[in-house]
Image (cartoon, rainbow, N blue to C red):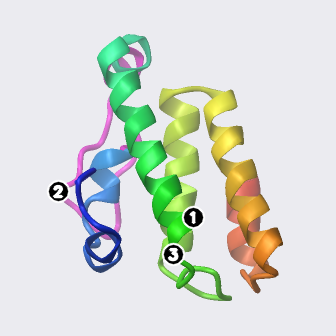
Amino acid sequence: MLAFNNAALEQNHDYIQWLFPLTEPSGAVPDAPVLTTEEVAAIAHSSIAQIVLAGATDRMASFYRDTDRWLRAEDHNHLRITRIIRSLRLLRGDAAAEGFKAWIMARVEATGAPVNSRSRGYWATA
C-alpha cells in the first residue's frame, strides 16, 4: 500500500483502515482490523510498528501535499484524515497526532480551501 501511486491511493478505499487501525470497527470496511487494548500497547511499544506507522504517515502526508482533489467542501479524504489523526493519537501519541493535524490544517489554510466546518471539527477533536 505504501508503494501505491497517488492515483491508486485515491481510487482504493479499503487500505486506510489497515494502515491506521482503531479499536472500533470500520463502517466502510467491516473486515478491517479492530485492535484490542493489548494490541494497542504492543504496537505502541514496538520499534518496528512505530517505523511502519511513521512511513505510512509520511506517505499519506505526501499524498495530501501532492494532490488537491481533497481540498474542497466535501470529500471522502476528510474521513481518512480523521482516522489517521485518531489512529496516530492511539498508537504513536499526542505529538504525532497533533503534528499531522497541524500540517493538514496548514495545508488547508495555505490553499484557502473550503473544507467544511464539520470535517474541521472532527479533525480538531480527533
Q: Which residue is mark 2?
A: 31
Q: Mark 1 and mark 3: span between their CA atoms?
A: 6 Å
- For numbered disc 1, what is the local secondary structure? helix
Residue 3 in which image quadrant: bottom left
Q: Nearer the viewer, mark 2 or mark 1?
A: 1
Q: Which residue is mark 1?
A: 65
Q: Which residue is mark 3?
A: 67
Question: The magenta stretch spans which residues?
Answer: 21-41
Above or below, comparing residue 118 to residue 85 in the picture: below
Name the residue type under label 3. Answer: Thr
Give the x, y percent position of residue 48: 30, 18
Within-10-Å neighbours for mark 2: few <14, some 14–19, many 20+: few
Residue 82 in which image quadrant: bottom right
Name the residue type under label 2. Answer: Asp
Residue 16 in which image quadrant: bottom left
Above or below, comparing residue 5 to residue 43 in the picture: below
Give the x, y percent position of residue 112: 82, 81
Q: Main secondary structure of the magenta part?
A: loop
Above or below, comparing residue 96 to residue 5 in the picture: above
Q: Nearer the viewer, mark 3 or mark 2?
A: 3
